[in-house]
Amino acid sequence: MRKVFLTSAAVMALGMAAGMTGCSSSPSAASTAAARKTAFCGGNIKIDKASGNVDSAAGFLTVLKDHKSALSAMEKNLPSGTLGTEAREEIAAAQAAVASGNANDLNNAPSSSGGDIDTYCGVDGNGDPLPAYFATGKGSSFCTTFIPIYDAVGNATSASGVLAALEANKTQITELATEVSGLPSSIKGKASATVSKAQTAIAENSAASLKGNGNGPAAAVALYCGQNQ
């Protein structure tokens, strides 16, 4: 489930978490597990797609109100395990926000689950299938440098905070620029655009070029690095 919070300069997306059910030697059990996953992911994808262009907590709450049946389907078909428990907590927070009409209730959801539910369902935060390059760069020199910067910018709560995060990583961003040419063609263009935007923000002392709703090139680069959120 895609949950979006818009700050004055940065957008943070939080996915819901879920764990894959265990394998079973019983065909009927396997069939039931597959059906539950289909129902659970169906609800998740509906919400993802409906909130793809949402850029505020209030907007996301409206999406949830319009998709109560999707939330219900997810609640009734939770996967097992720890991640399933976290998913239940996410859904409870969403339902509380719908019941109260207060978007602030969305902040009660656990913040450590990341985008595991979307990965479990094979989609990104917009409900689109994960790209073939998903996680292919995980652990690479580029990604090891990129992810901490991506997280620092995403966690900033103001334009000045975003700029501070970029300035603090100015040397690392310059390093990323030198590594772009060695990336696979599937992600090279998006990585180049991401680094360029960061450098422009630093040079112009403005985070305006980084504003968005989580759908920009940086999010695609994060997927390449194995971070789905």
Image: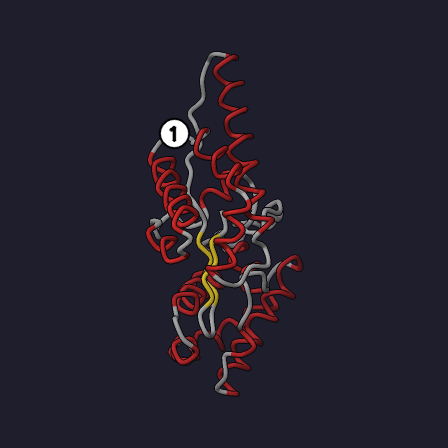
In the rendered image, the residue lying farthest to the front is 100
* Above or below: residue 154 compared with residue 111: below
Residue in the image at 53% along x and 80% along y: 199
The x, y position of residue 188, in whole percent, is: 63, 64
Where does label 1 land, which residue?
80
Visual colour scheme: secondary structure
- In this rendered view, identify the residue nearer to me: 220 or 170: 220
In the rendered image, the residue lying farthest to the bottom is 204
Residue in the image at 53% along x and 24% along y: 34
Q: Residues within 10 Å of mark 1 (few under 14, many from 20)?
A: some
The x, y position of residue 101, in whole percent, is: 42, 53
Q: Label 1's element?
A: loop
- In this rendered view, identify the residue nearer to me: 208 or 189: 208
> For residue 185, which quarter of the picture?
bottom right
- In this rendered view, identify the residue nearer to me: 34 or 51: 51
The x, y position of residue 59, in whole percent, is: 52, 58
Query: Total label count?
Result: 1
> For residue 39, which quarter of the picture?
top right
In-image side of 176 versus 169 (left or right): right
- Is residue 229 visible to us here? no
* Above or below: residue 204 compared with residue 135: below
* Above or below: residue 55 compared with residue 204: above
Residue in the image at 45% along x and 65% along y: 150
The x, y position of residue 220, in whole percent, is: 57, 58
As shown in the figure, which amino acid type bears the numbered disc 1? Ser
- In this rendered view, identify the residue nearer to me: 65 or 128: 65
- Is residue 28 visible to us here? yes
